[in-house]
Image: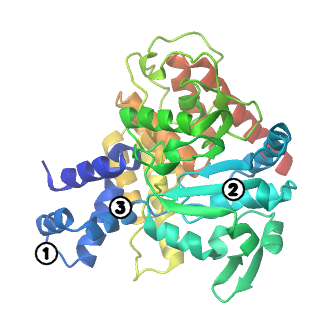
Amino acid sequence: MSEDARFFAFLKHRIGLDVASVGEAIIERAVRQRCTSAKAVDHDAYWQLLQSSAEEQQALIEAVIVPETWFFRYPESFGTLGKLAAARLAQLNGVRPLRILSLPCSTGEEPYSIAMALFDAGLQPQQFKVEAVDISPLSLQRARQGVYGKNSFRGTDLGFRERYFSQVNEGYRVEDRVRERVSFQAGNLLDPTLLVAQSAYDFVFCRNLLIYFDVDTQKRGFEALKRMTRDDGVLFIGPAEGSLLGRMGMASIGIAQSFAFRHRAEPLPDPLTVVTATPVAPPLPVEPSRLVKPIPPTTARIRSSVSPFAPASPVPRATMPPSAAAGEAATLLDDIRRLANEGKSAEAKAACDQYLKRYEPVARVFYWLGLLSEVGGDVSGAQGFYRKALYLEPQHPEALAQLAALLAAQGDAAGARRLQERAARGVNKEGRNR
């Protein structure tokens, strides 16, 4: 086993992370950072430390799962939650409060957004409780503190900050009335002893988690989420996960951009065994400069993933000013496009790996990695890269079109259609904005 492979295996065993879903470069960089911090002379010395220290094991996990989140991410889903919660309370007629789960909750932006959305919908504090779970104690510590900087507030509609935050020296602090509705605990979705796994919730938020698992781990995660969601409850997922969940016994509730599913009486066939193509509507067109037409997958297995994992932050380049670094990044992106279009797949992939080692991940790089994987016949890998692109940029038009084409070729007409509709909505929205 190579030096790096043993670290990949460790992360797979501990947190279910599929190295292919984030790329080897990101994990290698995290290992290098921890080697330096721990003053290990080489990888062998660091491996010995890792085996003997629970603290270092957690530190490596923390280095890999640097969170990427903000308040009211995917705002349509929170608007949908408010309407569904009001209707659900009317059905309960005061029997009990609503139970809501956020997993993984990262640094707290999502569960606090849930509480604020329910207050905005007119719910009273005693009518709901949010339970929040994450694998990272460091993230949970930040969540409990409830103080956030400007990176947690994105978009143009920040009225909620005036209603639910007070300004402090470090940024903005969540008001107590919101904090009191959320309880935090450490845990892993795949842990059978996880306390929250023993009960079912009216609403479950689990977004951008399973796309980082391999197929077998993914199925275990989906089954756990189904058990945690009441038969009459709703599961909110990430935008790249709908086609995966649609064949696992749950159906979309049909509200655009909400990414919300509920239990279905009769599950469709397991998508991992669907390999026969059926005629469907052609995918939306993509940019003329794309690499090649998709290779029809005839024997591929879907291999995508999710978790609280986001790519680790790049190592700062202290000697280079931000403007120069941005210029280098743009040049490297142009090189990737040129090499791919010239058919130099190996060179283009190497340029993608170089980009991920030096700069923050962007959707365009994962899109090109998806196309390069298709050219190489790795359809499963291509799907994983396209989903990663959509995690970073949910309306990335080319990634939507390519992933829709792959799903259509595998017989997942419903999944392909959903992606095509998302792409069309993005085009319409862009036209309105323009």
Q: Position of residue 79 (x, y in %)?
A: 80, 49
The amino acid type, in three-letter code, at marker 3 is: Ile
Q: Residue furthest front?
A: 95
In the displayed structure, 63 sits above or below 285; it is below
Tell which tag, 2 or 1, sits nearer the viewer: 2
Residue 180, quarter of the rendered image? bottom right
Q: Which SS class for mark 2?
A: strand
Q: Which SS class for mark 3?
A: helix
Q: Position of residue 159 (x, y in %)?
A: 83, 68
- Residue at 76%, 81% (x, y): give it: 166
Q: Position of residue 80 (x, y in %)?
A: 78, 44
**Label 3 sits on residue:** 61
Tell which tag, 2 or 3, sits nearer the viewer: 2
- Do residues under tags 2 and 1 come within 8 Å of each other at their CB atoms? no
**Label 1 sits on residue:** 41
- Residue at 45%, 40% (x, y): give it: 305
The amino acid type, in three-letter code, at marker 2 is: Lys
- Picture mark count: 3
Q: Which SS class for mark 1?
A: loop
> Which is nearer the eye, 386 or 322?
386
- Distance of label 3 from label 1 (alpha carbons): 20 Å
- Residue at 64%, 22% (x, y): give it: 264
N-term mark: 3 or 1: 1
Q: Residue furthest bottom?
A: 169
